[in-house]
Amino acid sequence: MYFTDRGIEELEQRRGDEAVTFEWLAEQLRTFVDLNPDFEVPVERLATWLARLDDEDDDV
């Protein structure tokens, strides 16, 4: 189990029944990076990965 699994599990437990838009998610990611600029690269990678999930040309 990765350390991040705990955070993911907490997110699922606390907010798993909610529905969100990608617009809302993007705004939360921007706010997080504004507050935590050291995480800009990982957040950028996550956002890009999510945006391209359906791209057949990209290798995961």
Image (cartoon, grey):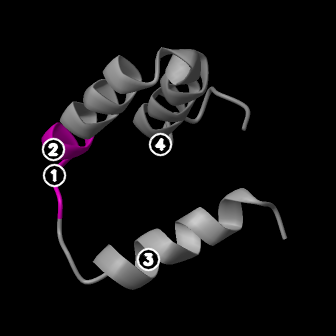
**Disc 2/disc 3 C-alpha distance (Å):** 17 Å
The image's mark for residue 39 is: none
| Residue 31 coordinates in the image, percent (x, y) | 26, 29
Residue 47 falls left or right of residue 57 = left
In the picture, residue 45 is in which quadrant? Answer: top right
Residue 24 falls left or right of residue 36 = left
Q: Amino acid at mark 1?
A: Thr
* Above or below for 16 versus 24: below
Quadrant, the C terminus: top right
The residue wearing badge 1 is 21
Please tell me whether mark 4 sits on a helix, a strand or a loop: loop
Dot 1 or dot 4, earlier in sequence: 1
* Above or below for 4 versus 1: above
Residue 41 falls left or right of residue 43 = right
Q: Pointers 2 and 1 in contact (CB under 8 A)?
A: yes
**Disc 1/disc 4 C-alpha distance (Å):** 17 Å
Front-most of 60 and 5?
5
The stretch drawn in magenta includes residue 31: no
The image's mark for residue 24 is: 2
For disc 2, the neighbor class at 10 Å (few under 14, some 14 to 19, many from 20) is few
For disc 4, the neighbor class at 10 Å (few under 14, some 14 to 19, many from 20) is few
**Residue visible at 35% across and 79% down in the picture:** 14
